Image (cartoon, helix red, strand yellow):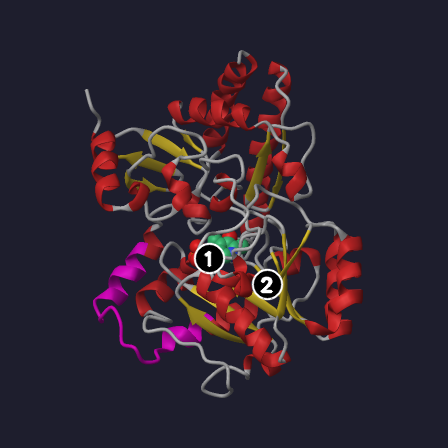
Amino acid sequence: MTSINQILFEKSQQLIPGGVNSPVRAFRSVGGTPIFFKRGLGSKLWDVDGKQYIDYINSWGPMIVGHAHPVVIKAVQEVAENSLSFGAPTGLELEMAELINTLVPSMEQVRLVSSGTEATMSAIRVARGFTGRNKIVKFEGCYHGHADALLVKAGSGLLTFGEPSSAGVPADVAAHTLTLEYNNTQALRELFSQVGDEIACVIIEPVVGNMNLIVPHMEFLQTLRELCTKHGAVLIFDEVMTGFRVHLGGAQALYKVKPDMTTLGKVIGGGLPVGAFGGRKDIMSCLAPLGAVYQAGTLSGNPVAVTAGIKTLELIQAPDFHVKLAAQTKKLVDGLVAVAKETGVVFSAQSVGGMFGLYFSEKCPSSFAEVMQSNKPAFNQFFHAMLEAGIYLGPSAFEAGFVSAAHSDEDIAFTIEAARKAFQSVAAM
Ligand SMILES: *Cc1c(COP(=O)(O)O)cnc(C)c1O
């Protein structure tokens, strides 16, 4: 019998390239048919054929309070009745700006956009306008959305396809983007000693979540901060994924390193399209209508989207929210490591706040090259065994995982039991 899921995927492929609206969703890396969903509640998802899953993707991060949280849904319904958009300012945008500024004080001024891609693209334009320089620096395996200049040695979906870069990006656009190895302090020092005074900005995922999870070395982050200050380059923390997830104040609060600019997305919209970029007032003043750097958006600051974000940011300020989230995520990771050990499968795992990384390798990687050495066939076997058991993980060995506040002790225990069998199937490969 053909499932509804199978029919939807076949029909979608006729009209939508690859049947999906974002490449990783297509399951190309792990093989098989992507799951089409119809409902979510708390930590659970249900697909179009009625099968239940525990969700460890959480829409790639935004659903940090769980799916269909009643407070968020009610607020969205109420604000929607007052019209979906004005293309003019609302008090909600001010409320959001105040919230961002309170939670992430380095963002002295902020502008709202509709995606993480827009946030990083615009932040780089501002940094270039502010410094009058062209060169930008990024790190291998970090993903900053799909703007041309940032699709150079990027992570996420691009890694899944084994492509270092995208076709359609002119070489002369990419030529201004310099790429370094993550966590390599020496290479960073060398680059700055050569061209430091030509660098407009350095953009970095302060915890990487787009080549699986990579934790920064403190010395690396601190050196980066010092070099940017010394050479007048703008340090941009791309906290689209880490913002409000690794800590209430983002990775910059967790590691106590203050960037000049920050980009946000994912959690900030609570599941609706919101992004933001902001930072030092002198830098942000370069933006139109105050300054000469142009940036705009018809739906920027959309009232419905911003409301979902505000309610989500209110909920995550509950006492000990992040302490509990981090503890629950660590419980998952420790449990997985323990059952992998029992089955003799080479496996490691780690977590930062509500983000986690699973690696079929001896130890947790700290660079792109190390991530690439993990056992991809083992991951794919594990992924499919878990999916069968109703555990929805990211469909690629190069994606991080996400836990929400709705994940209960029972969810974690169920997941670890399912993993025991999945690891056994890996051991039998
Ligand atoms: C997801 C992500 C982006 C892109 O955000 P979109 O909303 O998908 O455009 C940028 N940077 C990082 C670190 C991300 O994780």
Secondary structure under the numbered disc 1 in the rendered image = loop
Tag on residue 175? 2
Q: Residues within 10 Å of mark 1 (few under 14, many from 20)?
A: some
Magenta-colored span:
73-96
- Residue 109 position, x and y percent, is 54, 77
Q: Considering only order in the chain, which callout, 1 or 2, is on the residue closer to the N terminus?
A: 1
- Residue 407 position, x and y percent, is 46, 38
Residue that label 1 marks: 146
Q: Is there CB contact under 8 Å for labels 2 and 1? A: no
Which residue sits at x=62%, y=56%? Answer: 251
- Residue 77 forms part of the magenta stretch: yes
User: What quarter of the picture does the N terminus occupy?
Assistant: top left
For residue 95, above or below residue 11: below
**Amino acid type shown at disc 2:** Ala
**Amino acid type shown at disc 1:** His
Which residue sits at x=75%, y=54%? Answer: 220
- Residue 415 position, x and y percent, is 48, 27
Q: Nearer the viewer, residue 295 or 158?
A: 158
Task: Answer with the quarter of the image where residue 354 lies.
Answer: top right
- Residue 134 position, x and y percent, is 61, 73
Q: Residues within 10 Å of mark 2 (few under 14, many from 20)?
A: few
